[in-house]
Image: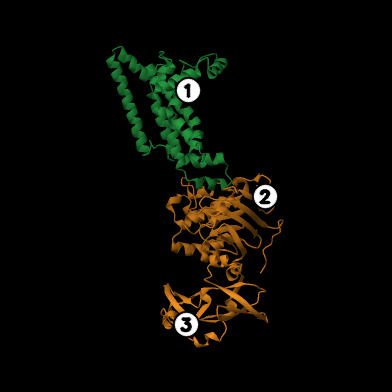
Amino acid sequence: MAAPRVDAMADTLIAECRAAPPGGFRLDAALTLPLDLAPVTVLFGPSGAGKSSLLRLLAGLERPDAGRIVFRDRTWCDTARGVWLEPQQRRAGFVFQQYALFPHLTVERNVAFAAKGQATARMMERFGLTGLAERMPRAISGGEQQRVALARALAAEPDLLLLDEPLSALDAAARTRTRRELRGLLAGAGVPSIVVTHDRTEAIALADWMAVMVEGRILQTGPVREVFARPATAQVAEAVGVENILPAEIVSRAAGLLRLRVGSAAFECLDGGESGPVLASIRAEDVALTRDVASASTQRNRLAGVVRAISIEGPLARVEMDCGFPMVALVTAQSATDLNLLPGESLAAVVKTTSVHLIAAG
Amino acid sequence: MDWQAIGLSLRLALATTLVLQVVGMPLAWWVALSRRRWKFLVEAVVALPLVLPPTVLGFYVLIAIGPRSPVGALYARLTGGMLPFSFGGLLVASVLYSMPFTVQPMVAAFGGVDRKLLEASWCLGVSRAGTFRRVVIPLARSGLATAAILSFAHTVGEFGVVLMVGGNIDGVTRTVSISIYDQTQSLDYAGAWHTSLLLVGFSFVVLALTYSWQRRAWMLWPTH
């Protein structure tokens, strides 16, 4: 995987901002995005992490207490040098959570509000809005409103597109449908976009690149799958929803594999060059369950434990175990039934060697 | 009926309304958007005419625009005339007296415009002035109409301020309300009766129209 480039002259967005948004975490975010590698970046994190505040700082709708924002070769903001560009000068299109369509204008006049040249007709066509041209915003569906908001932003020919939780105003059914559609629209928009979301599924479905934000800080940036597969810190792992983060100790290394001690169990994983105290992160869906408890103490990557609780979540069952430390497994409801799981029973958890990822503890 | 007085009242009310639309709009916009701590002081000053006796306001306006004041002296040097007991003086007093009737409905209307819409417009590259013209004014237009109607009606009905500042000069500063007072004093009850009835009818029609237009016409400061 390509490492994020930190070359100021390249096609990048650099934002280093400190701010104290009302009612949120102190924002102290450093973000570098390689715009050429990543058409769509997701700014991901739990609610209240400061994602929307950072997006508003990028748009110029809020001023940082200190910091700078450099987009390609243009400085948008630099408090040290007293540089400040108004939102109008940044050419960053903004799609609001509730879309903020002008209620007194028709769909077509919304799109045409700041359109350049023939862009209105082109965008109406591309976003399938031609049939809705004369309708008022309140008379169209949420998904249609979202398309109008996107078309309006793109018709002004921005250099960057910022979207604040673009799917959260939709109902569940429309969200799933629109998610797929939105990915295509953003990827084909011709300008890089940054999408704020707290939803894992949305992040995976929409983005090429991902920046994880927790408590006002950017903790990890990289290709989406890499961030999910290899969270850099325990906080990132928790934010991206890896359920099991276990303290581990490196016992030995040989032939590209590491031997670990996790509690009283022996684990094996791929050697990524880690050393010192580590955390083993294992996603709950990568944990299999078996009744073959006897061999658990001798075989690798097996943990003997006791079932504490079982909860059914749709087609899946979430099994919470006590293996000397809490361990969560996500199995199909069917296999939970087949195993006849009951709280208090002894069971073994099995994890593939390639599903154990190490995070430097500290 | 004193048609000259009625005509003068209508002219004064029209001029006052126009001046207030121009002066009141930026003031109301500032009050609606400002997050300054001392904003309440400006709000209180604008609302003062609602509670002050018209004679108090009239007295201070008379002093402030008199020939010995800087304002009055400047006016005299520029125009050669005097503000007290003239149409110009009446206009100044009326603008101050009807200020809350313009500013308060405007603040309510501006406050009702979602800030996200302004931000959306700015992010589309439209200037602040352009956004005000293309987004704020269209969305606040019923509030602006209310402001105009109330200011007009309130100016037609004013008495104390006009008497203090304008005196009672036939054809120059004798407005319809003063004319009714004169008619009553000279025991011309029939004339007073007719003119009063005209004012009652006029006021009722204006208010009925306003309420049918916008239910919250008399809403006070929305930020409180």
Amino acid under label 3? Leu
User: What is chain A's hue in the picture?
Assistant: orange
How crowded is the residue under tag 3: few (<14 C-alpha within 10 Å), some, or many (20+)?
Answer: many
Where disc 3 sits, the SS reads strand
Image vertical order of residue A11 relative to residue A246, above or below: above
Q: Considering the numbered disc 2 on the image, is that residue within a helix, a strand or a loop?
A: strand
The location of residue A86, given as percent across then percent down, is: 61, 45
Q: Which chain is green?
A: B
Cα gap from disc 1 to disc 2, whole angstroms? 49 Å
Give the x, y percent position of residue B206. Answer: 36, 30
What mark, if any, has residue A347 been given in the picture?
3
The image quadrant of residue B204 is: top left
Q: In front: A348, or A96? A: A348
Task: Name the residue type under label 2.
Answer: Thr
Q: Which mark is residue B92?
A: 1
Most foreground residue, B97 or A234? A234
Disc 2: which residue: A75
Tell me which corner region of the image, top left, top right, bottom left or bottom right, holds residue A351.
bottom right
